[in-house]
């Protein structure tokens, strides 16, 4: 009887490991994944307010598809057969939660970029001719959505940063016309890898250039100036690494700040210090 009970508990634990996933909060939603009861990986979401009301203020519980208010925003089992056997790599919900940008790994380090419209259920593919590594959302001064992504070169190195206007996709602009748009930037050094992310407050997109010996950061203001050349924080220098975060003003009259973690302060490549700079006019 004890052995049977133990086996039952282990079976339940295995089921839980598949059914539940750590939620990730994006704005007013928690996003999480499951295996679709064996039918293929899915991305789901549930409103933060619904979760916290049920949790009694104790934080998010283990989320699952059976919870009231949960909706499926991506089901890999429903994708075109071209993606059969491919696995989900990077997922980025849009700030308005209407769109889900994601990449699919064919298994050969080739990552296709796709976009799903939660309003219509339509999935748009062939968004990039090359293999996509990083993704990040931004909005222009008019509130239109843009998707920034990094693309690999022939050596499988993230070397290009591109910008995709979502309105062009919805309007049916041909892929060849979208692909003809010039890149935001290209990194020619074969030892440097390009990545794109966002500050925690989403005021800036952060373009990181990293090698084993140095790093460099350029910033793109979110909410305007998307077509301008990304702003350089500090020119690359052998042995110097740094990472940038932005802090909004906590109250009226307070300063906005750039917080930089770097080894340039100590002059020792192994020791890092903290530098705080006035963000002033939002220029680094």
Image: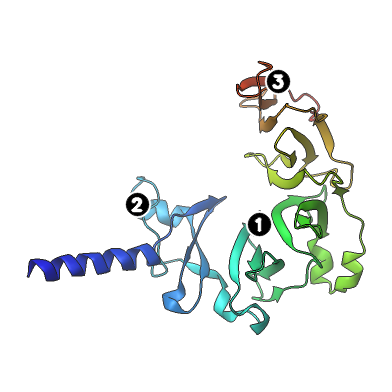
Q: What element carries label 1?
A: loop
SS at mark 3 in the image:
loop
Instruction: Please tell me in which quadrant of the rendered image residue 262 appears.
Output: top right
Residue 146 pos. (x, y %) = 78, 56
The residue positioned 73% from the left and 26% from the top of the image is 240
Task: Give the residue number, with chain letter if any, for mark 3.
Answer: 264
Q: Disc 2 vs disc 1: Cβ atoms closer than 8 Å? A: no
Callout 2: SS: helix
| Residue that mark 2 sits on | 55
**Mark 3 touches mark 2? (CB < 8 Å):** no
Q: Residues within 10 Å of mark 3 (few under 14, many from 20)?
A: some
Q: Which of marks 3 and 1 is nearer the N terminus?
A: 1
The residues bearing labels 2 and 1 have C-alpha atoms spaced at a distance of: 25 Å
Q: Position of residue 86 (x, y in %)?
A: 61, 73
- Position in image of residue 284 (x %, y %): 79, 28
Image quadrant of residue 211? top right
């Amino acid at each position: 009887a004890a052995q049977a009970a133990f086996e039952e508990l282990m079976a339940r634990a295995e089921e839980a490991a598949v059914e539940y996933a750590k939620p990730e909060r994006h704005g007013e939603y928690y996003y999480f994944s499951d295996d679709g009861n064996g039918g293929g990986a899915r991305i789901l979401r549930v409103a933060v307010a619904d979760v916290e009301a049920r949790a009694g203020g104790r934080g998010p519980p283990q989320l699952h598809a059976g919870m009231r208010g949960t909706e499926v925003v991506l089901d890999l089992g429903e994708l075109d057969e071209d993606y059969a056997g491919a696995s989900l790599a990077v997922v980025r919900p849009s700030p308005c939660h209407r769109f889900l940008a994601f990449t699919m790994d064919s298994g050969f380090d080739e990552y296709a970029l796709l976009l799903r419209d939660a309003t219509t259920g339509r999935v748009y593919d062939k968004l990039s001719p090359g293999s996509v590594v990083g993704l990040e959302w931004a909005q222009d001064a008019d509130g239109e959505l843009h998707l920034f992504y990094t693309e690999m070169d022939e050596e499988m190195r993230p070397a290009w940063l591109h910008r995709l206007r979502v309105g062009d996709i919805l309007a049916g602009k041909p892929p060849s016309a979208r692909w003809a748009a010039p890149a935001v930037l290209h990194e020619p050094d074969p030892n440097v890898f390009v990545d794109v992310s966002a500050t925690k407050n989403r005021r800036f997109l952060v373009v990181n250039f990293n090698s084993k010996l140095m790093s460099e950061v350029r910033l793109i203001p979110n909410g305007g100036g998307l077509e301008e050349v990304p702003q350089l924080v500090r020119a690359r220098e052998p042995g110097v690494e740094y990472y940038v975060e932005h802090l909004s003003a906590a109250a009226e009259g307070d300063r906005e700040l750039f917080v930089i973690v770097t080894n340039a302060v100590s002059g020792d490549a192994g020791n890092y210090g903290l530098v705080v700079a006035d963000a002033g006019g939002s220029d680094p």
